[in-house]
Image: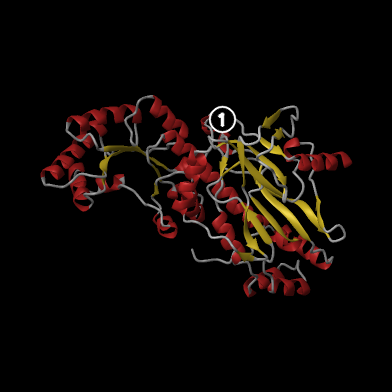
């Protein structure tokens, strides 16, 4: 409800570990990677979102008097450590994948290179931001892909899990392809289009449906979408809407951005019947909008049934990503600086679960494209500083099923690094684009994917490979244990 200091938006163990590092004088520079392990909702990829809020969080990290007093009251922290926190600021480097980029499991979305106390503190809030916005942006892609070019309006504010989820969920939904949001504060905050119609209560507050329609049309002649299912969609709602549209046209109103909304019933049947009625009355360009607990599966089904719906309002199932309510991003230590060797010592987390074994070292990711189509072939995770000559042949292989190999002939492919530097010694050097610019960038990135990767069901699994150097380091560390 007001601007908050998010410095204490962290798990307690981040602070208790910080105090331990502080008293053991362990503040060496480390590398942490934020990444995720599995694409949400069975999708072929995820959509990166939330970086702007991460930047804002890092820029405003500080322990004010109120925070220090609270930490003192817990009895867990001594005065020497609290004095250190009073002067705390982030001094490290951060690299990140730009918002709107398509991303895949195990790849660093954000890489933090900083003293370990600083890198540890930012974990929880960073994951909170990324996990939410990446999840909703990816869900929005699935919904808008199912809509096949029809506009999708994000209608989820009242069902979001709180104000922040409603506001930043709307932001992420716009990045993932939605055309507008009903959330007015999100519209103001992020300068994105807002849209909406009216509720059943509007109709019910008038003596009759026709009076309600006439009043609404007189107030909003250039944005007149009438909700027709309050009483009887085909016997009352649509005929009354047609009466109002006829009166508007006869009075000289140029009809644009107009139509009806269906919010209940058999949407396929009702939309087809309503389309016939509107067309016969001469309103072929009237848009039929549908809402009512829609998601990508229902939209696909309605499309397959020949529903005559031209726009979609999607709320609960989008803003909550109902079928997959968590993104599963994690934050893992991957390297520690060693003054004696003058470089980073790679670190690995092992597990009996192969999926949870981390990729060690200070890394980056290159996306490989087939030329001249400029379509993605694979992503190559490698050590930071590795270079590749695209005029030479390049052999890539699956890091698990290593017999699966592909050799790309020199001159037939290109490579683009995915991580960009965002913070340099604590100073932000990156300018965040607007939400609508990020949305356009996402569609450009989407064009670089093969159609098979965009399928909502059983999409092509992208090849995520390791460079030879990184693979050998990982294998050595695993064998050493």
- Image spot of residue 81 (x, y percent): 76, 71
Q: Position of residue 457 (x, y in %)?
A: 53, 29
Pointer 1 residue: 459
Q: Which residue reaches farthest left?
A: 250
Quadrant housing residue 64 = bottom right
The answer to whether 184 is drawn above or below residue 107 in the figure is: below
In the image, taking residue 266 as reference, residue 56 lies left or right, namely right
Q: Residue at x 23, y 28 (%)?
A: 276
Residue 230 in percent (x, y) is at 28, 39
Question: Seen in the image, is 77 located left or right of residue 68?
Answer: right
Residue 227, position in %: x, y?
Answer: 28, 41
Viewport quadrant of the C terminus: top right
**259 and 383: which is toward the camera:** 383
Disc 1 crowd rating (10 Å Cα; few below 14, some 14-19, many 20+) is some
Q: Is residue 195 visible?
A: yes
Residue ID at (66%, 47%): 108
Residue 321: in sight, yes or no? no
> For this rendering, which residue is in front, 89 or 259?
89
- Identify the coloring: secondary structure
Q: Quadrant of residue 90?
A: bottom right
Residue 17 in the image: above or below residue 236: below
Q: Is residue 229 left or right of residue 312?
A: left
Between residues 237 and 442, which one lies in front from this camera angle?
442
Element at label 1: loop
Q: How many marks?
A: 1
């Amino acid at each position: 409800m007001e601007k908050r200091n998010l410095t204490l938006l962290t798990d307690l163990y981040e602070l208790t570990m910080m105090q331990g590092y502080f008293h053991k004088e362990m503040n060496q520079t480390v590398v942490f990677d934020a990444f995720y392990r599995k694409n949400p909702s069975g999708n072929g990829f995820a959509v990166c979102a939330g970086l702007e809020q991460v930047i804002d969080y890092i820029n405003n990290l500080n322990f004010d008097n109120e925070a220090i007093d609270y930490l003192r009251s817990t009895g867990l922290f001594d005065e020497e450590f609290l004095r250190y926190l009073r002067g705390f600021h982030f001094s490290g480097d951060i690299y990140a994948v730009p918002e709107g980029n398509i991303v895949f499991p195990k790849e660093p979305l954000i890489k933090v290179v900083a003293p370990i106390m600083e890198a540890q503190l930012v974990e929880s809030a960073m994951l909170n931001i990324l996990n939410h916005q990446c999840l909703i942006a990816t869900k929005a892609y699935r919904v808008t892909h199912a809509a096949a070019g029809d506009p999708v309006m994000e209608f989820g504010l009242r069902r979001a899990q709180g104000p922040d989820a409603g506001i930043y969920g709307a932001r992420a939904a716009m990045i993932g392809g939605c055309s507008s949001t009903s959330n007015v504060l999100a519209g103001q905050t992020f300068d994105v289009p807002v849209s909406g119609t009216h509720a059943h209560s509007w109709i019910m507050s008038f003596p009759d449906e026709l009076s309600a329609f006439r009043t609404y049309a007189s107030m909003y002649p250039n944005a007149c979408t009438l909700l027709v299912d309050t009483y009887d969609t085909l016997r009352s709602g649509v005929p009354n809407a047609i009466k109002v549209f006829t009166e508007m046209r006869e009075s000289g109103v140029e009809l644009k951005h107009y139509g009806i909304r269906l919010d209940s019933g058999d949407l396929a049947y009702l939309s087809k019947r309503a389309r016939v009625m509107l067309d016969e009355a001469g309103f072929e360009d009237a848009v039929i909008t549908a809402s009512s607990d829609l998601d990508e599966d229902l939209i696909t089904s309605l499309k397959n049934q020949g529903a005559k719906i031209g726009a979609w309002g999607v709320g609960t199932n989008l803003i909550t990503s109902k079928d997959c309510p968590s993104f599963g991003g994690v934050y893992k230590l991957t390297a520690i600086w060693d003054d004696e060797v003058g470089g980073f010592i790679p670190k690995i987390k092992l597990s009996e679960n192969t999926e949870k074994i981390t990729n060690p070292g200070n890394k980056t990711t290159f996306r490989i494209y087939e030329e001249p189509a400029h379509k993605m072939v694979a992503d190559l995770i490698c050590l930071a500083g590795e270079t590749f000559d695209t005029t030479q042949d390049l052999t890539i292989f699956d890091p698990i099923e290593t017999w699966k190999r592909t050799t790309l002939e020199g001159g037939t492919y290109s490579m683009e690094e995915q991580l960009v530097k965002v913070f340099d010694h604590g100073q932000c050097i990156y300018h965040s684009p607007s939400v609508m610019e990020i949305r356009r960038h996402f569609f450009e990135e989407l064009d670089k994917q093969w159609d098979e990767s965009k399928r909502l069901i059983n999409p092509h699994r992208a090849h995520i490979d390791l460079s030879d150097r990184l693979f050998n380091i990982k294998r050595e560390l695993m064998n050493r244990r």
